[in-house]
Amino acid sequence: MISVRLTVNGRAVERDVPPRRSLAEFLREDLGLTGTHVGCEHGVCGACTVLVGGRSARSCLLFAAQLEDATVTTIEGLTPAAGLSALQSAFRDCHALQCGFCTPGMIVAAHELLAENPAPSREEIRAAIAGNLCMCTGYVSIVRAIEQAAAARRGGSLP
Amino acid sequence: MKPAPFAYVRARSLDEALGCLVADPEAKILAGGQSLVPMMNMRLARPSTLVDLNAVAELSGVDAAADGGLAIGALTRHTDLVTSPLVRERAPLLATAAAHIGHRAIRNRGTLGGSLAHADPAAELPAAVLALGATLVAAGPGGRRRIAADDFFLGLFATALAADEILVAVETPPHRDAAWGFAEVARRAGDFAIAGAAVAAIPGDVGRSARVRLVAFGVDDRPIRLTAAEIHLGDPALTPDAAAAAGAAAAGCCHPAADVHASAEYRRHLVSVLTEQVVREAAGRRAARREGESRWSQSP
Ligand SMILES: Cc1cc2nc3c(=O)[nH]c(=O)nc-3n(C[C@H](O)[C@H](O)[C@H](O)COP(=O)(O)OP(=O)(O)OC[C@H]3O[C@@H](n4cnc5c(N)ncnc54)[C@H](O)[C@@H]3O)c2cc1C
Ligand code: FES
Ligand code: FES
């Protein structure tokens, strides 16, 4: 077992983990943060995407033991205490989810995009979520939701 | 838990990491983990020990070299190659190649050294360092050695690194005349390339102003120099006309395999088209640079 100390969604966490425990399993099973979804477990689907040090990362390709002193933010950490974030309400309003399996990863990827680029073009949005697969909704409404959230965060409405 | 059990060491220094490799021949370096961990999860790799380099600070970062080139730490992430002002200015080919890798979350973790050590034949960064004629610096139990990119890639996922060596840095020469180009064809944004090409003019040997190096990737067991096409591209001959000749010669330089993504003929065709395209791109950049310079020298 390896002992790790890290910050998850603003909270200090200390645990002993087996070396082969992935960050995704650590979040879901040790911390009960089941918003992070696990699909392919080899980096291609994006469902497990979280922020590590503010940057998006596949939690299935990191071992919890690697995260000493790291700051991890999951979909739970991107959700306000009451109500929904701009991205979350835009996803709801635009019907950008059906089963919701891909949604936490989509929102993490979109969050990173909007933090760096508050007014992305449609092409930039498509590039930012190219690594996140959605099996049921299709991407048109997801792209529209991110456009709407960007506009809402800028304080305006869509043209 | 998907991978087979392993021991984990968080190395605090390069020497500690090298010591772990000597102590356990089945140990493997863990850098970004974006190639190694998928292989472990599929049990295609079963290292006994993972030696994590991520806390070895001396392996990250980009430094300007006196010759106008760069020294880039092996642990530098793909995202940092894309965004670093120094890399964009002094090695724009490398920054552009890195931007074509996978997706943002992959680029945020994956490292330059990891991509070169992994040596996927369709990977962008091995092709870029080969086109640049970069020098790779490896550290081993006996000290450091410098390996020319031309001598580094030996075959499918095979490099000149010994099992107890760690890639520590990559030294890139300055670009000449802003003459470089990079292009690839992939089925979807972020996929590995079906085929790609890169070209760079770098300072020449004594008596020659520049050397033009042309590389194709995704079309052989490693990134390859297109030497039969390079002969059309001497320094003064880096022109759109020469691009067509180079493109025609390029197809004969590679031995592509057929797979589910493309036939061998299609890959050979792509190498021709992409070679012509990157040479035109390089010629265009050089012409724009020279025009800018002459306008500058004529201004009162
Ligand atoms: C979904 C997905 C898409 C991808 N798409 C692309 C793509 O389009 N193009 C592309 O090029 N790559 C792609 N990759 C791979 C990515 O670029 C990896 O980051 C890269 O291949 C390996 O770098 P790493 O730092 O992650 O290395 P790791 O996975 O940590 O290591 C890879 C290998 O190199 C060894 N190693 C690592 N660092 C060193 C070192 N400094 N010295 C000696 N040995 C070392 C390791 O022991 C291991 O054998 C993709 C990956 C994923 C998961
Ligand atoms: S579960 Fe991590 S990318 Fe699919
Ligand atoms: S909403 Fe079902 S996978 Fe995207």
Image (cartoon, coloured by chain):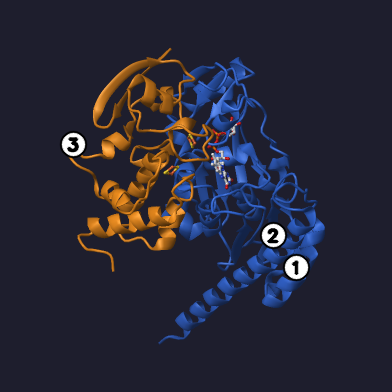
Chain colours: A orange, B blue
Tell whether label 3 touches label 1 (CB within 8 Å): no
Which mark, by number, is residue B246? 1
CA gap, disc 2 and disc 1: 9 Å
Q: Is disc 1 placed on a helix, strand or loop?
A: helix
Tell me, for residue B214, which label it has, or none. 2
Looking at the rendering, which quadrant does residue A11 occupy?
top left
User: Which residue has dot 3 on it?
Assistant: A81
* Residue lying furthest top: A1
Residue at the limit of the structure toward the right, as seen here: B252
Q: Secondary structure at mark 2?
A: strand
Say which amino acid is labelled 2. Answer: Leu
Q: Disc 3 and disc 2: Cα gap in Å?
A: 56 Å
Picture residue at 36% right of the left edge, 60% below the top: A120
Q: Position of residue B32 (x, y in %)?
A: 50, 35
Where does the image place residue A49, in percent across and percent down from the top left?
41, 38
* Residue visible at 55% across and 22% down in the picture: B3
Mark 2, other Cα within 10 Å: few <14 / some 14–19 / many ≥20: many
